[in-house]
Amino acid sequence: MRLPALHPVLLALLCLVASPAMADGLPASDLRTALEHADDYGFIRYIEIEADQDDQQIEIKGWLDETWRAEIKLSTSGDRRREERSRHEGGSWGMTLDQVLAAIDTAETQGMATFEEIKIDRRGRIEVEGEDRQGNDLELYIEADTGEVTRVDRD
């Protein structure tokens, strides 16, 4: 049985989708710079950080104090693109800036080159998603209190 040849446009699109250069995430240096801007903005705890290479922006969800939660989108240069605040009872939770930076350092030592998402659950488990230098998916699970890597998934 003879298979039909792929149309050149379809072939080009498939190559783009599979290319490591088209990673969704950002390098650690861009992420650290954005976190400096988020710290200046007033975040005391971070719940979720999502990086988008295509839009050169980072979305951050976290706490400004014990009752005010915020969600902002920043360009990688620190310009605020969107901002939402809401009042919540029950106190803040999430990662401190030091815990986020430690998670980034740990992920880099495990081979992560670009970062797509860092988030924490209420039990204190940090999940870091990204890609290694070859464009392979990499996920790390880290205990926030100890910094211990509890699981590494490589695809």
Image (cartoon, rainbow, N blue to C red):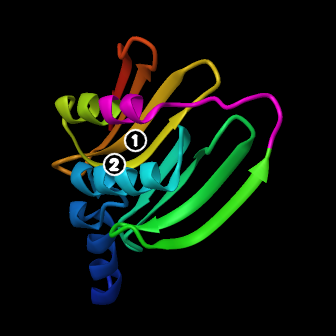
89 to 142, vertically: above or below: below
Q: Is residue 122 visible?
A: yes
Q: Which mark is residue 115?
A: 2
81 to 129, vertically: above or below: below
Q: Residues within 10 Å of mark 1 (few under 14, many from 20)?
A: many
Quadrant of the frame with the N terminus: bottom left
Image coordinates of residue 57 in percent, x first then y, are: 42, 67
Q: Which mark is residue 129?
A: 1
The answer to which quarter of the image holds residue 23 is: bottom left
- The answer to whether residue 85 is magenta is no
Quadrant of the frame with the C terminus: top left
Label 1 SS:
strand
Three-letter amino acid code at the position of disc 1 = Glu
Image coordinates of residue 78 in percent, x first then y, are: 39, 67
Q: Is residue 127 left or right of residue 21?
A: right
Q: Residue at x 25, y 49 (%)?
A: 28
Q: Residue at x 45, y 14 (%)?
A: 145
Q: Is residue 2 visible?
A: no
- The answer to whether residue 93 is magenta is yes
Q: Between residue 31 and residue 50, name the one nearer to us.
A: 31
Image coordinates of residue 9 in percent, x first then y, are: 32, 88
Mark 1 or 2, nearer chain start: 2
Magenta span of residues = 88-102
- The kind of secondary structure the magenta stretch mainly shows is loop
Q: Quick check: marks 1 and 2 in contact, CB under 8 Å?
A: yes
Three-letter amino acid code at the position of disc 2 = Phe
Q: Residue at x 40, y 57 (%)?
A: 37
Q: How many marks are shown on the rendered structure?
A: 2
Label 2 SS:
strand
Image coordinates of residue 93 in percent, x first then y, are: 63, 29
Q: Residue at x 73, y 29 (%)?
A: 91
